[in-house]
Image (spheres, rainbow, N blue to C red):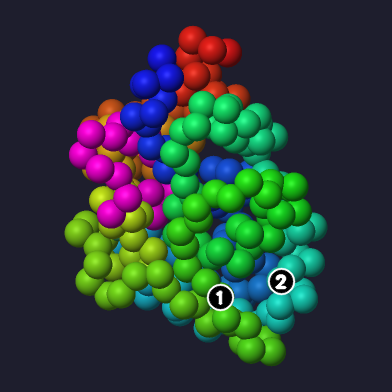
Amino acid sequence: MNGEYQRLMIFCDFDGTISQNDVLNKIFSKFGGPEVQKLEEKFKSGELDDRETLTRKWKKVKLDYQKFRDFIIREVKLDPYFKDFLELVSEKNIDFSILSGGFLNYIELLLAHNNITRGIPIYGNRLQFDGERVTPVFLHDIDSCHQSFGVCGSCKWKIIKDQAPEQKKVIYIGDGLTDRCPAEEVDELLVKRGKLLEEYCQKQGLNYHSFDDFSDIIKYVFKDKV
Ligand SMILES: [Mg+2]
Ligand SMILES: [Zn+2]
């Protein structure tokens, strides 16, 4: 059984998957003004790609670092079973990484705030704060994505391709639009019930397993152990 765990690589989205709410949506609806929703609609319809949408949204935001930090710590909770999941992952020595289409600034803050200090590889974009101006610094360059959605700021498919050797069994866990990019490329796909990624998988006829929170993910990954 341990051999089987050794072959596993688990990649997991952050916003709305590890965090209970989508952190970026929360920030943009609080600090972004009315234009931001229109940009989101254009992203959903495919008129704008991920990178362009994020660039334009952050231009609408006025937020200094202290306010950002306070807001994140006050407003965002993690999935109540995420820590249990991490313990099992650690016990079984499973390769686990966080792949975010969002920003390392709040992911690192939230993990530290929840006393998660184990070194987890985290891939994502970064924010630069300059007074109340916030500028995204993207993980990947233009044209790095293979998919038809345009350019990802942080391309999850590219990260998985770079990190996972052929013989590994890759599980991907996610909920949203930036998870479409790796969805078709992985061995097993875990999708949050009732969210946009599920809608997409149904439209595309992709195989997936749905979950409500990490207690379902624990049961799925560690079937015969829990
Ligand atoms: Mg998400
Ligand atoms: Zn991509």
Q: Is residue 86 left or right of residue 206?
A: right
Queried whether the magenta region covers residue 181, the answer comes back as no
Disc 1 marks which residue?
127
N-term-proximal mark, 2 vs 1:
2
Q: Nearer the viewer, residue 45 or 55?
A: 55
Tell which of 132 and 223 is nearer to you: 223
Residue at image x 62%, y 31%?
A: 87
To which quarter of the image does residue 25 belong? Answer: bottom right
Answer yes or no: is residue 214 visible: no
Q: Amino acid at mark 1?
A: Leu
Find the magenta span and give its range.
Answer: 162-179
User: Vertical placement of 93 versus 98: above or below?
Assistant: above
Residue highlighted by disc 2: 68
Q: Could one spot residue 180 in this view of the protein?
A: yes
The residue most toward the bottom is 131
Q: Tell me the kind of residue under disc 2.
A: Phe
Q: Are marks 2 and 1 in contact (CB under 8 Å)?
A: yes
Q: Quadrant where the N terminus lies?
A: top left
Residue at the spot 27% in from the left edge and 75% down from the top edge: 142
Queried on whether the Cβ of the residue with tag 1 lies below 8 angstroms from ligand 1, the answer reads: no
